[in-house]
Image: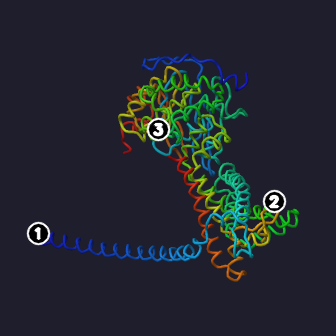
Amino acid sequence: MSERRHLNRHHRRAGSDRMGRADRLIYLCFLMVVSLVFLTYGKVIFDIASQGIGQINLSYLTDAPRQSGRAGGVFPILVSTVLVLAIAVAVALPTSLAIALYVTEYLAQGSALSSLFRSSMLILASVPSIAFGLFGSSFFAQFLGLGTSLLTGGLTLAVMIIPICAFAFVEVFRLLPTGYRTGAYALGAGKARFILCVMIPTCTAEIITVVLLGTGRALAETAALLFTSGYSDRMPESLLDPGRVLSIHIYDLAMSIPGGDRMAAASAVLLIGLFLLISSVGLYFSKKAHP
Amino acid sequence: MNIISRLSEPKPAAAGHTAQVVPCPAGPPVLEARAIRVGLAGRDIIRDVNLSLQPNEILAIIGPSGCGKSTFVSTLNRMIHHTLPTAKVEGEIWLNGGLVFPSSASAADLRCKVAMVFQRPNPFPFSIRMNMEFALKANGDRYRPGYADKIEQALRSVNLWDRLKDRMNDVATRLSGGEQQRLCIARALLSDPDVILFDEPCSALDPVSCTAIETLIQDLKQRCSVIIVTHNLAQARRVSDRCAMFWLRDGSGEVIETGPTDRIMTAPNHEITRAYINGEFC
């Protein structure tokens, strides 16, 4: 009897040892993948930073580019970038929120129309950005007569990020606890009051995160802006002027300007810094919304 | 008389929060459901349900899971359109002598007079004050200077004022489960409802909180009528004046017996009710 008990104990221990080895193996695999990814990204950031950070100083941020960008600064380019981004977010945020609210609150879940909306947004979110660039060029620039301008670029970016944001908003709103919805309606609230006073305030942090996701996508975009916002590195005087955004500036310096590599790296550092700044501000408000 | 004027008929003033035995007066029912049928995907969830609720009465709805108790209760204030949007509801619902279903009158107005408290406490993740103010605004109360008094009165009714008066800016979801449920009841009381529907209000709570809610339900009897759905027969015995037994027959929920709680618990007429009360289906 005691022998059998001893054997059982032995088998259990052997089993747990085997599991322990498997756990360690899986842990090491994950650690290896994570380290590899971090090292790769670290190398990319390090290379860009080591080349570009030395070029960045106050006059780089406040001067206009000279010698096709080989010298001078990036001030007009920063202004164009911020304007294009502001137009894109100002148009995309309310539009994608409206789409998501319509899909979640006004269409029956699982209905054919709701499924069609969701799958359309998913497909549009994966359309190559060059296709949006061509659309923006033919629709906003030519058909609406806005020409190659910051407005055309911003609107094109908005069209590009609306499906991404709308799809993410739908998922955010679907995850809202059912109790909030039933609680609000049971108190006599109408749909508008529920959306404005419960749904949006409750999801503020998630809404900010989705906007940051869209902003990051827009900030890094080059292909969609090639035909829409233009190459001009002059200071824009109105939204109907062409303007060069940072990503196009980097592309131009790296691909077309001999000796432009260092300045391209400096602009890349600036682009990363700009995104970090926007993300930090977004995360601050996101944390404030959900203390 | 139109629906809005019927909904706003004067009611007896609310008394203090000490429990007193209030006899159930016989007379016109405050709420009446006639021949209610709820169909979903070609199947009747409940059929031919006729129930009435007297003023200042507590009616317990008992029966096994899945026999349509919660579905029935959610038809009474048309919440079913949110919980089961594709359900087809037939029959009539009368409140204070006025037809409220079918009716073109606003469901929101109806819900102010037939309030509801759910199984799980569902305060919004805002401050206690904002939760209460939301209810007042949802009721169409635009007189903001009166909010503080109304909120204090409602929280006193659920015995929470002394505990929460200095914590009104705390996030409501950080309260204990029992406190959250009492806050939800206080929120529902702000519209001065004629009827409060409780859908298994204690099933997610510990016994101490459960006792507090039961005492509160009995206190509420002095200011309105109550329907409580419960699986807990002891709870039905403790709090209710009358019971309605739901049972699943041919896949649809039906009321098989109604009567005073004492009689239903001791000498039910229906064989199934007797077996259910005695736990013979366990």
The lab-note entry on whether marks 1 and 3 share a chain reads no
Q: Give x and y (percent) for residue B68.
A: 53, 42
Mark 3 and mark 2: Cα distance apart in space: 65 Å
Residue A162 visible, this angle: no
Q: Which secondary structure lies at badge 1? A: helix
The chain letter under disc 1 is A
Q: Residue A2 got which mark?
A: 1
- Of circles 1 and 2, which is in front? 2
Q: Residue B200 got which mark?
A: 3
Mark 1 and mark 3: Cα distance apart in space: 52 Å
Residue A274 visible, this angle: yes
Q: Residue at x 71, y 71 (%)?
A: A129
Q: Quadrant of residue B177?
A: top left
Q: Which secondary structure lies at badge 3? A: loop
Which mark is first along the chain, 2 or 1?
1
Q: Residue at x 65, y 75 (%)?
A: A264
Label 3: how many Cα within 10 Å (few below 14, some 14–19, many 20+): some
Q: Which secondary structure lies at badge 2? A: loop
Q: Inspect the image, locate mark 2, and give the three-letter code of the amino acid beneath it.
A: Glu
Q: Inspect the image, locate mark 1, and give the three-letter code of the amino acid beneath it.
A: Ser
Q: Which residue is mark 2?
A: A237
Q: How is the image coloured?
A: rainbow
Q: Nearer the viewer, residue B230 or B185?
A: B185
- Of circles 3 and 2, which is in front? 2
Left/right placement of residue A184 relative to residue A161 reads left
Say if A277 sits above or below A54 in the image.
above
Q: Give x and y (percent) for residue A218.
A: 68, 64
